[in-house]
Amino acid sequence: MKTSIHPDAHVTKVTCACGNSFDTLSTIEEISVEVCSSCHPFFTGKQKIVDTAGRVDKFKAAREAAEKAKAEAAERAKKKSAKEDTTETEA
């Protein structure tokens, strides 16, 4: 096996956004993570929404806008068909 081709591994402190930290071996000296085993729903059994950059709110707003547009289109179609019915009866 060749010597000096492998990177140096040293004890690394991993810090989670929830505040939990633990030590492991890595080539990087410090690691920051968003979710760890102390706060991940699979391990805790609790539901948690990890929202980065407001994606959940953005999705909800887009969905509400789509539903509103769909309702307005249905209303326009209803008015248009009612208008066509009245013009047919007059003719």
Image (cartoon, rainbow, N blue to C red):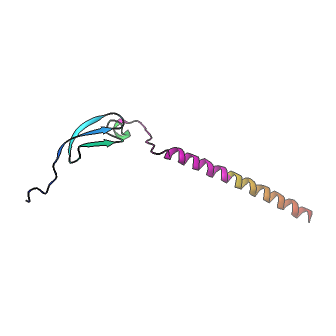
* Quadrant in the picture for residue 5: bottom left
x 27%, y 40%: residue: 14
Quadrant of the drawing holding the C terminus: bottom right
Q: How many marks?
A: 0
Q: Is residue 75 above or below residue 22?
A: below
Which residues are drawn in magenta? 44-70
- Relative to residue 44, is residue 26 depicted above or below? below
Q: Is residue 88 magenta?
A: no
Q: Residue 90 at x, y = what percent?
A: 92, 62
Q: Is residue 2 left or right of residue 73?
A: left
Q: Farthest residue toward the right?
A: 90
State the image coordinates of residue 40 (x, y, percent, origin top left): 36, 39
Q: For the point 14% across and 54% down, which residue is it?
A: 6
Figure quadrant of the N terminus = bottom left
* Residue found at the very far bottom of the displayed protein: 91
- Pick the front one: 89 or 16: 16
Q: Is residue 7 above or below residue 13?
A: below
**SS majority, magenta:** helix
Across and down, in percent, residue 42 comes to 36, 41
Q: Residue at x 28, y 35 (%)?
A: 21
In depth, the one of 71 and 56 nearer the eye is 56
Residue at the top extreme of this rendering? 19
Judged left or right of residue 19, residue 61 is right
**Residue shown at the point (83%, 59%) measured from the top left:** 83
Query: In the visual, does 54 lie left or right of 74?
Result: left
Q: Is-magenta flag for residue 55?
A: yes
List x then y, in percent, for residue 60. 56, 46
